[in-house]
């Protein structure tokens, strides 16, 4: 894989405040990296350093092999950047603003028009092209910002909360657009929407207090959830005792927890030992003792559980760092 973004012990201090504290990671062509962390974690500061808008205090950031400190202009030519809030010129229309961006990027004539028409279609801006940007909704302003980020077809995209302010249909469209562009680019997506990570990201990192705490695929991070691979099963009230006695004896089962009472049923959570998949052996053991299972599914684990575990506890951070 071709590494497009390479961070080496990257740090940023603002006086006594350590905003980014020794982050090292790389992003390859074809990857969509989800950048997760609580407010103030250092996500936006890191992205601004990658994009060449902030100079690192220590360490290095390289984009397509170019050090952002040595040649920030060359870096900016290779990056499409959607910053937080997507600042634009409110008195301009989207048409005029995109024309201005195309001019700055060095396009003119038929090529300028082609690129503007292309991004307008991609982000669905046709209906508001001639309205002042300051009159647009937050969602449309966000789409104008996304249009300027992709206008020059950059090899690297850095998107800070790209679906902020969008309605569900608009979010779906932008996520589909990111997936469409992904094979030919390296993309970083900062988001507070954890479902977005599952929807569009091939990999995710979690940072807090400026430190990188976890790095893996969404599936690998979800596997860190306490409920990953847990069985949820419901049985009739008359079978509760036999169910509990049977399930706990199955090899690989760590425990059986009662969850709730339903209409004529009781729901339980069957906890597996680490690395064990107990669905088939538990179901077979219950069949042999004639316990009818009325509901059965396997919990995948939830990113929000993992996110809270990593970012709110010291022990979670330590476990994640060594995962």
Image (cartoon, rainbow, N blue to C red):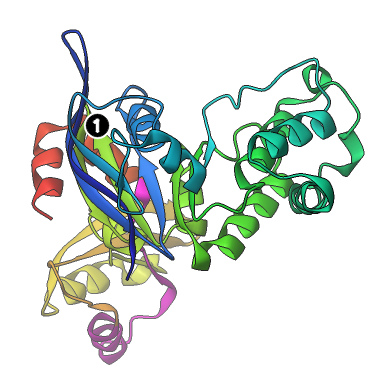
Q: Does 320 appear above or below 243?
A: above
| Mark 1: secondary structure | strand
Give the quadrant of the N terminus. bottom left
Quadrant assignment, res 82:
top right
Magenta-highlighted residues: 280-303
Residue that numbered label 1 is attached to: 208
Q: Which residue appears at 75% of the width and 35% of the height?
A: 98
The picture places residue 45, in percent across and down from the top left corner, at 34, 27
Q: Is residue 174 left or right of residue 220?
A: right
Q: Is residue 266 left or right of residue 273?
A: right
Q: Is residue 224 left or right of residue 238?
A: left
Residue found at the far bottom of this picture = 288
The picture places residue 226, in percent across and down from the top left corner, at 22, 53
**Front-lying residue, 314 or 81:** 81
Q: Is residue 10 left or right of residue 291?
A: left
Quadrant assignment, res 309:
top left
Can residue 79 be spotted in the picture? no
Q: Which residue appears at 65% of the width and 50% of the height?
A: 174
Residue found at the far top of this picture = 15
Q: Which residue appears at 48% of the width and 62% of the height?
A: 264
The picture places residue 15, in percent across and down from the top left corner, at 19, 8
Q: Is residue 58 magenta?
A: no
């Amino acid at each position: 894989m071709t590494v497009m973004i390479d961070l080496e012990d990257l740090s940023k201090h603002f006086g006594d405040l350590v905003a980014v504290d020794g982050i090292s990671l790389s992003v390859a062509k074809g990857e969509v990296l989800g950048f997760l962390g609580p407010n103030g974690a250092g996500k936006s500061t890191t992205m601004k350093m990658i994009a060449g808008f902030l100079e690192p205090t220590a360490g290095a950031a390289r984009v397509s092999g170019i050090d952002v400190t040595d040649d920030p202009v060359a870096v900016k030519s290779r990056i499409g950047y959607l910053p937080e809030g997507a600042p634009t010129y409110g008195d301009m229309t989207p048409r005029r603003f995109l024309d201005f961006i195309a001019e700055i990027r060095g396009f003119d004539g038929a090529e300028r028009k082609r690129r503007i028409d292309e991004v307008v279609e991609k982000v669905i801006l046709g209906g508001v092209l001639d309205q002042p940007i300051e009159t647009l909704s937050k969602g449309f302003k966000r789409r104008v910002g996304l249009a300027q980020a992709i206008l020059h077809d950059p090899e690297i995209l850095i998107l800070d909360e790209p679906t902020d302010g969008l309605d569900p249909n608009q979010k779906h469209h932008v996520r589909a657009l990111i997936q469409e562009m992904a094979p030919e680019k390296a993309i970083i997506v900062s988001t507070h929407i954890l479902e977005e990570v599952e929807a569009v990201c091939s990999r995710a990192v979690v940072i807090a207090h400026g430190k990188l705490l976890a790095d893996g695929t969404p599936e690998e991070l979800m596997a860190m959830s306490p409920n990953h691979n847990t069985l949820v099963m419901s049985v009739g009230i008359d079978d509760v005792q036999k169910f509990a006695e049977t399930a706990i004896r199955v090899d690989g089962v760590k425990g059986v927890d009662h969850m709730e009472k339903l209409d004529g049923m009781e729901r339980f959570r069957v906890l597996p030992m680490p690395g064990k998949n107990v669905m088939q052996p538990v179901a077979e053991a219950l069949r042999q003792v004639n316990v009818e299972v009325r509901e059965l599914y396997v919990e995948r684990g939830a990113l929000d559980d993992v996110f809270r575990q990593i970012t709110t506890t010291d022990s979670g951070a330590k476990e994640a760092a060594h995962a």
